[in-house]
Image (tube, grey):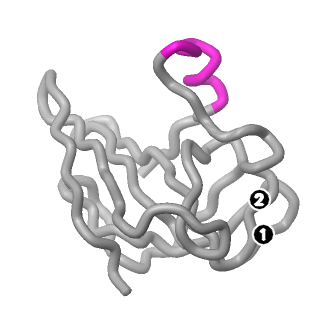
Amino acid sequence: MKLVDATKRAKRHPDTFQIPSDAVRAGLRPGDLAKLIFCDGKRGCERMWVIVEKADGCSYTGRLDNVPAFLRGKLGQRVRFACKNVIDVGGGRSGGGGAALATLAIGAGLLAVNWPRRA
């Protein structure tokens, strides 16, 4: 799975794709949640939450907190990512929502699925 550069996407679509500030994306600590966009060339993209385990500047390591709907991957899978990949933050130490919302790209349309995060 490849991660999307959220910074580039936000610059291309400033009216429809907003991301947290640089300071927020650079300030994640262990226990925080970061939402990332995972893609592959065949199945499309999924937005999923990752629990931050290690932070080193703008480099992070965490564990996938969603079960992918159609991409290869599994709950708890280790993920390395950077500030530029973060599209949202929430839950964990930073507060925020208690449910994960994944937007699944299915064919030409989008389907939003809301399910509770694991405890």
Q: Is residue 68 left or right of residue 119?
A: left
Q: Position of residue 59 (x, y in %)?
A: 77, 59
The amino acid marked with disc number 2 is Ser
Disc 1 marks which residue?
55
96 vs 73, nearest the viewer? 96
Give the image quarter of residue 90: bottom right
Q: Quadrant of the C terminus?
A: bottom left
Q: Is residue 19 magenta?
A: no
Please determine whether, in this image, residue 6 is positioned above or below residue 93: above
The amino acid marked with disc number 1 is Ala
Disc 2 marks which residue?
59
For the stretch drawn in magenta, the main secondary structure is: helix
Please determine whether, in this image, residue 82 is positioned above or below residue 9: below
Q: Are marks 1 and 2 in contact (CB under 8 Å)?
A: yes
Tell me the crowding category of disc 1: few under 14, some 14 to 19, or many 20 or more residues within 10 angstroms, Cα based.
Answer: some
- Which residue is painted at 59% across and 68% down in the image? 95
Q: Position of residue 32 (x, y in %)?
A: 63, 70
19 vs 42, nearest the viewer? 19
